[in-house]
Amino acid sequence: MYVSAINIRGFKKYEDYKVSFKEHLNILIGENEAGKSTILEAIEVVLNQKYFLSNQNANILFFCKNNIKNFEASKTIESLPKIEIELFFCSSTDPTPNMGRFFGEHNRSSEAYYGIRFEYKFDETYSELFQNFDSNPIIPIDFYKAEWKTFSGSSYNRKLNPLKSVTIDNSLNKYGIYDNFAKNMYETIYDEKTKNFLSHDFRTNIKKFLISNKDELSLDECQTFSISEEKTNIKSLLTIEHNGITLQQKGKGMENIIKTQQALKNSQSKLILIEEPENHLSPMNLRKLISDISKENETSQIIIATHESLIVNRLGLNNLILLQNSEPKTFDKLKPETITYFKKIDHTNILQFILSNKVIIVEGAAEYILIDKLIRSHKDVTMGLDDYKIEVISGGGITYKHYLDVAKNLDKPVLVLTDNDSNPEIIRDVQTLNEQYEAAATPIRIELEHDIEKFTFEVALFYKNEKLLADLTNKNSSKNYNEKEYPKSLAFMLNNKTQAALRIEEKYDTEDLHCPEYISRGLEWLINS
């Protein structure tokens, strides 16, 4: 059994949101505050009854802000905010008898599925009391109730958790993560019979200790030191040691690795929720952790929330779930060669590409260095890349085709600036592609120089600024590039592309530089898109 979907209504940022999951690996991505952590938290609320077991005033923080505003505008009992979370299950094998308790029509669709439904809402038995509140009532959180029920309509308790879930939270602002993780692992690994035996044996040995040290612990005839029964619960004292050192004493990075490895090795864990696995890890250790996740994900369902492009690349773009606006976006239809490319070339910041508002894909380092100066030099443009919320990605040669495969899943403008390599066929192919994109209303545009003599960016830039760049290099500089003679400055630009771009960036003012025509065409299209 695995979690196939979650429906969230009124919880934190989500008014009404549904996310579907794959059986094994799922990677949640999105901008800051997109709700990645909230998805994991919502799963925990349903499966492990996290929060809401006691009616605390802090529970008001879990309501969707828009629902609170709606109540404040009308002050009616009907408009009181509430939270509904439905967790759907699916099985890749024949259903077992134990799954029967989760099957039924008690969900919003009134159709038969496996799952659990959580509700946090005003207890209507207090409706008359609400009517007697003053004319400006606050949300009566003291009169709310939390209910967990399976889709069969029966009550649910976290001891019935069918997935033996484990949460690994590596975010910076959490406390008590060591002991909570130990408790979760303990609950996951052992069945009730084993836990009862361990608990009994633990309390028995404490009793023996108290008896054998009775005289030493005695205060007087009537009083003696003892140990509270409440504190003899073995779970309240559990932690985890690694080579004799507790997790609390480990560095944050090592603690992260150990927790994740333990969860992955535990075959009883059917659902593993991982929050920001990249935190505190060096690139080498992160690669090792990603490798562990890749090897183990066939036996468990893993849901990861991350900001790290290396994780996205290595674990496969087809496993991504992009959280955005009204519904999430997936990348199941990507070409296999695209997925393989980004797995192998894992230094590419594909996450930056996916999360950007607008993108320029350039051929190489020189364009990357100079593109902001060129956009500022463009007529009628007074702002730079950041002002237009444009990201620049270096994806030379045919690499950009892999990015465009990803871009087809995204409704955002993407401009490709590429070279014609003195090949008329490349120019014709680009023209055909642009016509296809335009006919399909796909916001992708490829621009290159139409003059085959201007075969690359440096040539186009030089002849647009020939007088300005005449003194780019010294008089003794070579005129040759690929056994062909060029003006000295151009030959220098072709032979030393990055160095020349840095020199242009530092030496010349923006207002004196002129943008090549093909780049101007592209920038106008992108800015107006």
Image (spheres, helix red, strand yellow):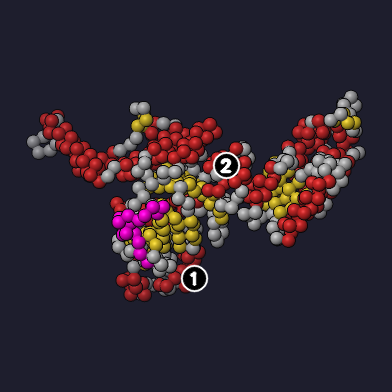
Q: Quadrant of the C terminus?
A: bottom right
- Residue labelled with disc 1: 73
Q: Position of residue 394 (x, y in %)?
A: 70, 41
Q: Secondary structure at mark 1?
A: helix
Q: Is residue 42 visible?
A: no
Hey, which residue is sitting farthest front in the picture?
Answer: 94
Q: Single out the mark in the foreground, 2 or 1.
A: 2
Residue 38 image position (x, y, % from top left): 47, 53
Give x and y (percent) for residue 407. 65, 51
- Answer above or below: position of 130 versus 516: below
| Residue receiving disc 2 | 313
Q: 1 or 354: nearer the eye? A: 1
Question: Measured along the vertical axis of the image, is residue 358 above or below residue 142?
Answer: above
Residue at horizontal 49 percent and vertical 63 percent from the top: 16
The amino acid at mark 1 is Ala
Seen from the viewer's position, the closer of residues 459 and 121 is: 459
Q: Is residue 155 left or right of residue 482?
A: left
Circle 1 residues within 10 Å: few <14, some 14–19, many ≥20 = few
Q: Is residue 274 left or right of residue 312?
A: left
- Decide if residue 172 is on the left or right side of residue 120: right
Q: Nearer the viewer, residue 436 or 487?
A: 436
Q: Which residues are magenta?
A: 91-105
